[in-house]
């Protein structure tokens, strides 16, 4: 039997708290899970610093990746006998689902911003480069690695396959909404996935939804909306991300200034130069980052030391509502006051803005990352979701942004009570 | 208002997936949670290496400690107006619940075994030594740290307080059974805690259970039984623990041999000498351990390198049933065969035995760690649980032991097929 | 001790699948639950004929009434020490919550429509009339029955008390959404009630919500929206209601024509005359109705017999989308065709329209049944929910209506295939 | 296509709170669900009078029957490709699962006892007699009705088929434990059915369990044990059953005495004569019974009237522990005292004994209703469960009996306080 169709002698199951069981029968999938590159995802949290807000959110990307694989598997189980589905794409689909987040590094969001990286590039490199993952994929077929990379990169010719992994209602989103809700413990994030899976239909270019399942999809869209604002953009999480970002900036700055680190930032050097090789990149995970931060707590540089202390011991910045577009003068004044007070505003004053588009229909001429959701009516006509659903229509295309100003309230409190500076800072911050 | 009775201006709540919400009103509790010693528990997994078996089991001891606190809080909420409860012990009880696991280190089970440590000693030292935790406790009362340590050490004069934290049905066990079930996703571990809390009554020396709640307690005992055998003693978890233990042994051995590490084991030195100070101890957490193991994967010492590789990339030992008491000759022969094959049996052949006593009644003259559970009947008579419950009686005092032999099947497979050694090893292993 | 403050020697608990436990300590509440008028609610299903669509929906109004009581109890537990809450209103509030649905009869919706009744009048009569409930309430205070009736009737002077029982986010709605979701098994209907209860604050005239809890309220509003369209207005349920309504019309018609029933409709007579006394009303419950329908299956009148057969054996009408406002001519033609085919359109052709307003803000000058939801901001300012919430704003005030045409497809299929009538009917129905 | 292999054009699904969805594809199954005999199960509660103890337990046998069908369907889905499974038995198995409880009447337990009936005889008659169900089964094959009856009656030649429906771990039990737990809301009754289904294997004569699934089976056995004692044998439920039994006895007695009923017991006559025809039997359901009891509340016979009042309005008997084997003298004395006090002991004093055998292995020579559970080991050897499982062994074969004495405490309280009789009765009852 060829490697690509080889089945395990006995099905392997993973006990999964979200999907109850993850089932693996394909040898290829089993082998991929066993690679160092995939096991590395155990050392990267799915929600980065969110565990500082929701203590249950300590689950890893390994968890999520298995979950996405399992959802793809269930979708394809339903497609199996459908005339519009080509069973030859099955393994490709499963593999792309499993590996779609392979390139994530520790606290990706912050690292990508500070060091100008894109985890999708690394996903691609891991799949195509000299890795255990690549060797397994090549055994399937020499062209298989490229196909997997193309599906994840959304450039694969069969758009139906792409849409199972990346669309506005794909296996990725369905897993993370449920999983993140489960581990944080919030009551949002529930929707009837079993029903959604049952009303999904393969079509030429995309997965569509039988119109009778519209309400389950509405529920999913609402879940997503609530998860974004209640969990993903939680202001406390953003506070820890601000601190993390500042640590990275400071360490880079010190490195560039030839500062003498007690612990030389070996794992970080190529990042500071914004050119980590694949090997460098794979070596960095959250345990490594935490190791450095714990040592750096005792560095002589006061800013680096203070920020690491804050991060490791969850001594976060406070925040207020603050819209830099309308409050530019206050921003300038705060900047000046902080400097006068000896609190470096480059590291201790930050506006963070988060925004989300809960659902979007296709607008011709625009650059759309994810396809809109289409319902298929009784007469086989396709209708874009927001035209049928009042609720979705109501929130469709409406971008919402939240601005917060972050600062170390303990530093401000520590200023002399008589000082004009303290009074004025408090005046501005307390509105 | 005194510090010990100071209330937060607004109740703080933590979203908890197991108890829904953890509520904090006492300033002391809030301050303790914010200490570096308590935040450190975020970097220590509640179930050590179990996440290699159950991928969801990535939750930390921080999680569990908050959960124990919350259960104690709910118990005391019910005791509040009971004549046998002294409300002055409230803060002590809450604090002991919160801090009872403070001295746990990374992978405690293995570290304690290899380096002759006891996490309870460190819990005590953190509470009584020069720490942020101690400073907060002293603000309550100079004797408060000692009282907290005594409750956790089970030597406190008021045995009722002790039994809330440590007995066969205490807040600790009730939290971990439910929490570990939640995060692993297994279907065991459920019992009606709400009912148990409602039938708990404070008595002179212990918490007792109203007889009408007996069945909920039976269910709890059964949960515990199943969790031990299905989760805590899972043979795959024990495989990863065997490897971990071997790494520690090997590193210590190399250190003692003055082996030149590429990464000197600074964080480990005092452990190798079996005399870590409190400061050394607190510096070690799972991110630090993982950092070393990842570097040591590339050490020249083949054994250390191989074992670290196995641990980091989950390339575990296989296992078979094997009772060393009855199979001593086979054990000796395997030892010899491994040596001949060039596989060092000190590191690559290990019997692991786990045993559990699901419930125990009090046997006079014996050294009992945990009190038996007493039911209080309608006429206020006390009866030991196993005398009333058929199921509990059936499993009471019955110790069960499971023996497994662990070995690297890949090494054995890699031996030459012609070799007599390989054949004989396989003969023995395959029974 | 006075009756109104009498506490049970031991708290009574009801195991409840939705709220886990319902707790009763007040003697008055316990006595009310034991009255025949309250026990009668066990014989009336909470969701009428919905069990023909969702087989799990067999739960009674007894269930729901206990649930509302329990939610009120939990709300008041939180209000207990609040300066704006008058603890003297506690028993009144609990009682009104428990009894608010006392006047519901079997399949209220259909009975009220056909016989021009209002269950709220009967709730009032049971509370004020010569009943066991009234005798208990009078023991509390001679004015107590009237106060309870006023709270339920929304005319009580303390509007805060009224709003706990009847508003857009009251104990009634919070119970039925969760309960109906639980018993039907749908995945809608979940929201974080524990959080909502914690952010509720008593104010002068109403219960308001702390702004930090807005998202939990949004989730509740969305739940409600989904439950209406997915459960309460399900077209299959409406089909069984159409049949039920037709049975009642037919029986009344026959009675007025002095038709000789095999089983004289004794329990129905006063309803046919649209003047049931309280005694008549209380005698009718779903077991009585089902008894008659089962006997009437064998009546000589073909229409009555057929309709009863359909109802008892769930042999329902089929339906299509049909808007009588735009399809009046087709309606007229169908009416004529049915008559020609010998299928009496008065009983076998019906348009049913359902509409819902998911959330409404207050519009001055309009007759509003339920108050809008107000958030209380940090500065104690009140803001109406839809001004703060994008999602709620999006659906606020938008009435949606669904029209369906119901008919017996088996009768039409049974017409001769050659018949012009059949062809034309099918043409219209199949659009 | 033949009727027996006819598939619905589109799969029908029932939303089920326990199994999420019940899936129907076979035309035969769909048609059977639509029969009046099957729909009648909606009017018979699964747990009889248990709703007087657990208010959520209002679910019908219709619910449960669909659930059993669904579990059988899932079992067979797993067996589909197994060499020891004969796919020709599939429809038979599904049908037997669906119809196995078809002969249940209202409050079967009490009716069977009082009128010497056996619901299994009626299940058989409905399947083989002149019914809609029989007509459908005959369309499959003239022998099909007999085969279905044989599977349900456990006399079918293929014992494997029988064991799916009736064994110690069959689809029937797996459904009712979970369903009854769900509707009552108790925390018992949970076990990992998904895992059990996955470890079930068809063998010659029975379904066996892979040894690796033993713990899930243990959990199921424990669930069953707890459900029996916590739910099924709850003393309050037995109180309502005692009253129900007494009503039936009294009505029969009055009928035999030619008592003039206000409402003649037409539906009961053939039951009183212990010879109901199938037609009589099918006409009786819980709505009919409740109709009579409500009318009989106003009968002149004081005993009948009082008992019906108690049943309808849940005014139950109180109970104490009472073992008639050891307390025979007290029983005799109470009997006498009741008679003297004018309280007819035939209707107002009753000992009820319930007993359960939680699990039983096969004992040669004994008459065993249900097969023991067999594990299949790695080497294909079969081992009876209690030999492998400590817990199961501990409770195996141990019959437990609970005796309670029931009496109307209100009648006793109403006796004159001076009376010697009252004092003595209370002395005995209060032990």
Image (tube, coloured by chain):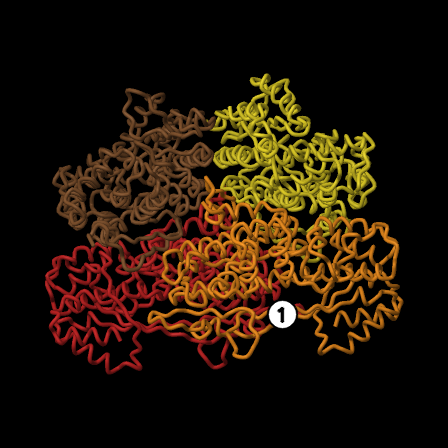
Chain colours: A orange, B yellow, C red, D brown
Q: Is residue C151 visible?
A: no
Rendering coords of residue B240 (x, y %): 63, 36
Q: Is residue C8 above or below residue C251?
A: above
In the image, residue B27 sits, relative to residue C339, either above or below, namely above
Instruction: Tell me if A329 is positioned left or right of D385 in this view.
Output: right
- In the depicted view, which residue is nearer to us: A33 or D428? A33
Task: Determine which quarter of the picture holds residue A179.
Answer: bottom right
Is residue B168 at least partly visible in the picture? yes
Q: Position of residue D89 (x, y in %)?
A: 26, 41
Give the residue furthest to the front.
B418
Percent across and percent down for residue C24 are 48, 48
Image location of residue C267, percent across then percent down: 21, 59
Report the front residue among D180 and C272.
Answer: D180
Q: Which residue is mark 1?
A: A355
Callout 1: residue from which chain? Answer: A
Mark 1 closeness class: few <14, some 14–19, many ≥20 residues within 10 Å: few
- Quadrant in which the C terminus of chain C is drawn: bottom left
Q: How many marks?
A: 1
Q: Is residue A302 left or right of residue C77?
A: right
Q: Secondary structure at mark 1?
A: strand
């Amino acid at each position: 039997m060829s490697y690509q169709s080889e089945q395990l002698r006995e099905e392997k199951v993973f006990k999964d708290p979200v999907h109850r069981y993850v089932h693996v029968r394909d040898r290829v999938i089993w082998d991929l899970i066993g690679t160092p590159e995939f096991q590395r995802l155990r050392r990267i949290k799915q929600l980065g610093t969110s565990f500082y807000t929701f203590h249950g959110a300590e689950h890893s990307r390994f968890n999520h990746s298995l979950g996405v694989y399992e959802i793809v598997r269930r979708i394809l189980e339903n497609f199996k006998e459908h005339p519009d589905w080509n069973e030859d794409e099955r393994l490709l689909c499963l593999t792309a689902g499993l590996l779609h987040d392979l390139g994530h590094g520790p606290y990706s969001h912050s690292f990508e911003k500070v060091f100008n990286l894109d985890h999708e590039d690394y996903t691609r490199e891991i799949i195509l480069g000299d890795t255990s993952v690549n060797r397994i994929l090549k055994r399937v077929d020499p062209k298989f690695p490229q196909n997997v990379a193309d599906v994840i990169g959304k450039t694969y010719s069969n758009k139906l396959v792409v849409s199972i992994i990346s669309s506005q209602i794909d296996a990725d989103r369905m897993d993370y909404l449920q999983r993140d809700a489960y581990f944080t413990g919030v009551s949002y994030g529930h929707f009837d996935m079993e029903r959604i899976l049952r009303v999904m239909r393969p079509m030429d270019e995309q997965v569509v939804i039988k119109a009778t399942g519209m309400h389950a999809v509405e529920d999913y869209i609402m879940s997503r909306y609530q998860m974004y604002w209640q969990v993903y953009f939680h202001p406390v999480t953003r506070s820890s991300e601000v601190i993390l970002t500042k640590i990275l900036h400071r360490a880079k700055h010190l490195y560039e200034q030839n500062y003498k680190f007690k612990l030389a930032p070996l794992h970080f050097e190529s990042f500071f130069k914004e050119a980590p090789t694949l090997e460098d990149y794979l070596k960095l995970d959250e345990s490594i980052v935490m190791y450095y931060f714990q040592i750096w707590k005792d560095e002589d540089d006061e800013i680096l030391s203070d920020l690491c202390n804050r991060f490791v011991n969850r001594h976060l910045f406070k925040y207020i509502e603050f819209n830099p577009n309308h409050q530019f003068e206050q921003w300038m004044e705060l900047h000046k006051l902080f400097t006068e007070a000896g609190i470096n505003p480059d590291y201790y004053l930050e506006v963070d803005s988060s925004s989300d588009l809960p659902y979007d229909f296709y607008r011709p001429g625009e650059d759309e990352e994810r396809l809109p959701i289409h319902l298929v009516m009784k007469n086989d006509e396709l209708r874009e979701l927001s035209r049928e659903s009042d609720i979705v229509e109501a929130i469709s295309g409406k971008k919402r942004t939240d601005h917060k100003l972050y600062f170390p309230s303990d530093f401000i409190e520590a200023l002399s009570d008589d000082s004009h500076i303290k009074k004025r800072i408090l005046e501005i911050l307390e509105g």
